[in-house]
Image: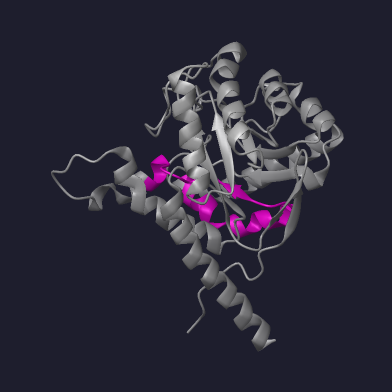
């Protein structure tokens, strides 16, 4: 009988951020999502921030995530759900910067990532104390973003996306055999672009972009082949939390006659996805709910470690 297939050795990396380094790979790290936009796909968006009650609520939510065990925060002030409408950089910064500043005032040691593809917002956020830029476009939607990351020395999360949010619902499906090669080649291209613009490889993390131009079962094909992405030589971040393809997989087995929120309907499916991702060697999970993810990672990390120990003893 064959053994369960695991990532036999999740590689260790020293991920260089703007002012510090972070060891990734020893255990799975959690990045807590803080949506500062009213139109988040997952229904957890916080009110437009500014300097009033909205900013205080958002900062309290972010601090609670850190207290719950999140290793990093990811603040985003523009939705990238399918069909989302862009917001101005002025509005994005109005929502974002007061929350960023409020969190760092209380927790100056917090590692904060900013989910933006706008160079102007990235520059302002890094000046305010952010450590990482999480660019869902992989540096392709704003020509100045690479220069901002390079000159500030920020950590960079490069995501693979296929088209823009307005395109995703009408894109033709991908044959299963093309999904992983497309993502792998796209991330290779984005890494080369970043390096050519002066971003050091040790500052890069890659994200295959589940749901970003991948529809339905295409995401399961990507998840099943995730181990191939270790060949990129950079740590992996995944955002599976509450994604639609997980909801599709469990729809037929959900309790009948119950009104479930999106969060409730996809909670167990998200946990299952997180375990699969860790066993494939993911370094960081981007999550909506910290505690369920911590528990899932505790089990998956223990299994990963046991598999690596077994292989070592057999050798």
Lateral position of residue 44 relative to residue 141, left or right: left
| Relative vertical location of residue 307 with respect to residue 37 in this rendering, above or below | below
User: Is residue 281 inside the magenta stretch?
Assistant: no
Residue appearing at x 19%, y 39% in the figure: 259
Where residue 87 appears, x then y in whole percent? 54, 15
Residue appearing at x 83%, y 41% in the figure: 200
Residue 221 visible, this angle: yes
Q: How is the image coloured?
A: one colour
User: Observer-nearest residue: 155 or 173?
Assistant: 155
Q: Which residue is the extreme one toward the left?
A: 257
Lateral position of residue 192 relative to residue 276, left or right: right
Residue 239 visible, this angle: no
Residue appearing at x 50%, y 34% in the figure: 34
Residue 203, by quadrant, is top right
Q: Which residue is the extreme one toward the bottom?
A: 314
Residue appearing at x 46%, y 18% in the figure: 48
Q: Which residue is the extreme one toward the front?
A: 106
Lateral position of residue 38 relative to residue 111, left or right: left
| Relative vertical location of residue 58 with respect to residue 9 in this rendering, above or below | above
User: Observer-nearest residue: 159 or 162?
Assistant: 159
User: Observer-nearest residue: 78 or 86?
Assistant: 78
Where residue 293 appears, x then y in whole percent? 46, 54
User: Is residue 233 inside the magenta stretch?
Assistant: yes
Where residue 173 appears, x then y in whole percent? 48, 37
Stretch of the chain drawn in magenta: 218-246
Q: How many marks?
A: 0
Where residue 315 appears, x then y in whole percent? 70, 86
């Amino acid at each position: 009988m064959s053994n369960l297939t695991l990532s036999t050795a999740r590689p260790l990396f020293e991920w260089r951020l703007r002012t510090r380094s972070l060891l990734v790979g020893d255990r799975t790290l959690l990045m807590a999502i803080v949506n500062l936009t009213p139109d988040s796909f997952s229904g957890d968006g916080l009110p437009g921030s500014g300097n009033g009650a909205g900013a205080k609520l958002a900062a309290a939510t972010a601090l609670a995530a850190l207290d719950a065990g999140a290793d990093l925060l990811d603040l985003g002030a523009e939705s990238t759900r399918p069909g989302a409408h862009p917001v101005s950089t002025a509005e994005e910064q109005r929502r974002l910067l007061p929350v960023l500043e409020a969190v760092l005032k209380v927790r100056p040691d917090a590692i904060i990532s900013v989910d933006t593809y706008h160079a102007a917002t990235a520059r302002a956020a890094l000046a305010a104390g952010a450590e990482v830029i999480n660019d869902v476009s992989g540096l392709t939607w704003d020509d100045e973003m690479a220069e901002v990351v390079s000159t500030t020395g920020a950590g960079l999360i490069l995501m693979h996306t296929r088209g823009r949010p307005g395109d995703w619902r009408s894109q033709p499906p991908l044959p299963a055999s093309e999904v992983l090669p497309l993502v792998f080649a796209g991330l290779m291209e984005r890494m080369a672009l970043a390096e050519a613009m002066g971003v050091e490889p040790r500052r890069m993390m890659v994200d295959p972009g589940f749901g970003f131009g991948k529809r339905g079962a295409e995401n399961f094909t990507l998840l099943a082949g995730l181990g191939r992405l270790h060949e990129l030589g950079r740590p992996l971040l995944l955002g599976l939390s509450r994604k639609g393809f997980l909801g599709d997989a469990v729809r037929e087995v959900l309790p009948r006659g119950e009104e479930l929120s999106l969060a409730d309907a996809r909670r167990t499916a998200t946990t299952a996805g997180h375990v699969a991702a860790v066993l494939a060697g993911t370094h960081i999970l981007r999550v909506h709910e910290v505690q369920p993810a911590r528990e899932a990672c505790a089990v998956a990390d223990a299994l990963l470690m046991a598999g690596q120990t077994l292989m070592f003893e057999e050798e």
